[in-house]
Amino acid sequence: MNSFAQVDRIKDYDLPRNLKVIAEYDDGKGNTIREVQYQQRSMRVTEMIIVPKVFTGIGIKAKISPDSVNKDSVWLLIDKTKYVVQVFYKKKLVRGFRAVFGPNPKADKCMEGDRCTPEGWFKIVEKHNSSKYNKFMLLDYPNEKSYAQFNKLKDEGKIPKNARIGGDVGIHGIWPRGDDMIEMGVGWTDGCIALRNVDVDDLYAWVKPGTRVYIRK
């Protein structure tokens, strides 16, 4: 099945809605603690989000047009702790976008269904418009290192023998009027990296199939 078709098959009923902030405070350790609630299907979800107060590069927008650069010199850094996607061109940080992940963003992906974002080096293998999420940039997960880690976890008994490795991991936008989910840091994805649509439009212009992506905790 086409990966983009898989993403776009998600029904409106499955999307989170009615987001509200229950509490927000500084923990005295350099973090903002945010408690949010939202509705997903028939469930009321309460989520605690820890946002570090450190330099993230979010909002950086260097006066460089993506149309004027050699895209072979562009690479992405995705930091799951800082909730950010950074775009580097010739070692210079030129863009920084706020991002969200799954409900446990700091966990590495182990298998299909764990809703975690994989860590390590990947490449963008496809980019396409998405009817559900505006734009979609597919990563080459699982790659050779992903399979090696997956098989090791099976051998060690840390995941079930019948587990599958999963796929369809990428960077995408969000449904119309869904930006609050990004701004609040809500971990609603199944392991993909989600941006505001205005940001995913910008990012889309910087990358191509073959663009390197490094994802870290």
Image (cartoon, rainbow, N blue to C red):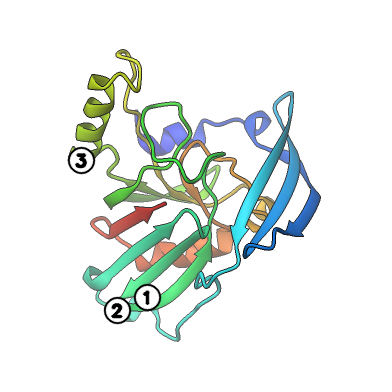
Between marks 3 and 2, how big is the CA–CA gap?
Answer: 30 Å
Which numbered mark, 3 or 1, is in the foreground of this view?
A: 3
Give SS at disc 2: loop
Q: Can residue 95 be seen in this view?
A: yes
Which label is found at residue 56?
A: none
- Residue 42 lies, in percent from the top left, at 74, 23
- Determine which residue is flagged by label 1: 66
- Looking at the image, the residue that sits furthest to the front is 28
Q: In this view, does 78 lie to the left or right of 125?
A: right
| Cα–Cα gap, marks 2 and 1 | 6 Å
Q: Name the residue under label 2.
A: 69
Residue nearest the viewer, comparing 94 with 198 = 94
Which residue is rendered at x = 29% and y = 79% of the image? 69
Q: At 29% across and 70% down in the image, what residue appears?
A: 74
Label 3, label 1: how many angstroms apart (C-alpha)?
A: 31 Å
In the displayed orientation, state which residue is furthest to the bottom.
63
Question: SS at mark 1?
Answer: helix
Tell me if label 2 and label 1 are in contact, CB under 8 Å. Answer: yes
Task: Give residue 198's position: percent from left, percent from top.
Answer: 57, 64
* Category of crowding for the residue at label 3, using alpha-carbon neighbours closer than 10 angstroms: few (below 14), some (14–19), many (at least 20): few
Residue 124: in sight, yes or no? no
Q: In this view, does 185 lie to the left or right of 215?
A: right
* Residue linked to disc 3: 145
Left or right of residue 117, residue 73 in this image = left
Q: Which of marks 3 and 1 is nearer the N terminus?
A: 1
Question: Mark 2: which amino acid?
Answer: Val
Left or right: residue 163 versus residue 48 is left
